[in-house]
Amino acid sequence: MENVFDILKERGFIEQCTDEEAIKELLGKESITFYIGFDPTADSLHVGHFLQIMAMTHMQRAGHKPIALLGGGTTTIGDPTDKSDMRKMLTLEQINHNAKNFKKVFEKFFDFSEDKALMVNNADWLLSLNYIEFLRDVGVHFSVNRMLQAECYKSRMEKGLTFLEFNYMLMQSYDFYKMFQEYNCKMQLGGNDQWSNIIGGVELIRRKSSGQAYGMTFSLLTTSEGKKMGKTEKGALWLDPEKTSPYEFYQYWRNINDPDVEKCLALLTFLPMKQVRELGALQGSEINKAKEVLAYEVTKIIHGEKEAEKAQEAARSLFGSNAKSADMPSTIVEKSTIENHIGILDLMQQAGLIKSKSEGRRLVEQGGVSVNDEKVQDINRQITMSDLDEDGQLIIKKGKKVYHQIKIES
């Protein structure tokens, strides 16, 4: 069987390793237990988590045992990594609710039968810790000078880093030590922004038990311009269909920039790399075929084949003569709103298509707004009953890619 290290390397996952040669040898000669931590700071996982899940799936398919560690304890502190301000404090009730939602997603991806995967929660050991004992047992192994050199802390020093957050590295390191002791977990994986925290765990295991553990980080999901991928008009690109519909999810990938297609096909699908390279090499308008494949495959993995087919059909219908679909994002308005006339900017704001009227004015002036395929020329354009079709609907197009149905409340 091909070494999973080579698979992850070829597909573009691997960013940093504590010892690349040793890790490759380890993954090739034995089945190991590894983990990734997921702090339930929101009620849904997002597309950044999806990349981690894909890496874990590749590892399990190669015979290794994943542990999905729910951060019920670490979430009470909040990871300062990549944050300009302190995270919002959540109650234990909120954290537990979010963790339950995460579990549902993990159960879709990993095979938990016959002890092939585990799901544990660090609240089980972190919330009951005696603080003095923890400092004497764990804190003694950490140098404040070295911790302050970590990127996750350096970037926060100017704006202010709370002592609460300063404890996060100790807690995550202790997680790795605990997993090493309890489950013989030899490796922690994570996004590249977790490198300092992972190193802390590797070092703690070495100091406290003379054990050998390893860390490996993955590239963050970014565009070719270096910006974080997964931001939409409504915020994050969520895996929960109630927060980001399968149609919106599909459309996001269908509309990504040309240079990002091959990278996303490699990281976020299971297509063979030969096919990935062939699709990524398409030029001009042909690259749209690759984008369709990407959007379909990623939506199928997250939401299932049926939803992927519906989303694809809905997306294709937008480019036909009748750009209407039940799966298109829509807003229901009262009939009286249209009967009394409503300005296009007010309607777009009500539908969540713009955040402000000034944004809407710019779009109209730049020719970026259409109603039923007719470009809006006047920022004072009024929407009336005559704009509705026989079903009491109209379609607003924003830019080249965003379509939105307005439906009258029946």
Image: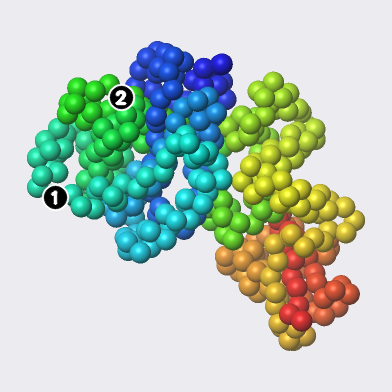
- Residue 335 in percent (x, y) is at 75, 83
Up-down: is 112 above or below 397? above
Q: Please identify the quarter of the rendering in which residue 187 is found.
A: top left
Badge 2: how crowded within 10 Å, few (<14), some, or many (20+)?
Answer: many
Asked whether residue 211 appears in the rendered view, the answer is yes
The answer to whether residue 290 is left or right of residue 57 is right
Q: Residue at x 73, y 86 (%)?
A: 336
Residue 130 shows which numbered tag? Answer: 1
The answer to whether residue 48 is left or right of residue 183 is right
Q: Secondary structure at mark 1?
A: loop
225 or 302: which is nearer to us?
Answer: 302
Please tell me how many numbered marks the rendered image carries: 2
- Residue 146 in percent (x, y) is at 20, 31
Up-down: is 103 above or below 145? below
288 or 175: which is nearer to us?
Answer: 175
Q: Earlier in the sequence, mark 2 or mark 1?
A: 1
- Residue 229 in percent (x, y) is at 55, 43
The kind of residue tagged 1 is Asn
192 or 129: which is nearer to us?
Answer: 129
If the image is split into quadrants, where does the N terminus sit? top right
Q: Residue at x 74, y 59 (%)?
A: 327
- Residue 235 in percent (x, y) is at 53, 56
Asked whether residue 345 appears in the rendered view, the answer is no
Q: Residue at x 76, y 81 (%)?
A: 410
Q: Secondary structure at mark 2?
A: loop
C-alpha distance separating marks 2 and 1: 26 Å
Q: Residue at x 32, y 33 (%)?
A: 183
The answer to whether residue 16 is left or right of residue 409 is left
Please give the residue where the numbered disc 2 appears in the rendered image: 213
The kind of residue tagged 2 is Ala
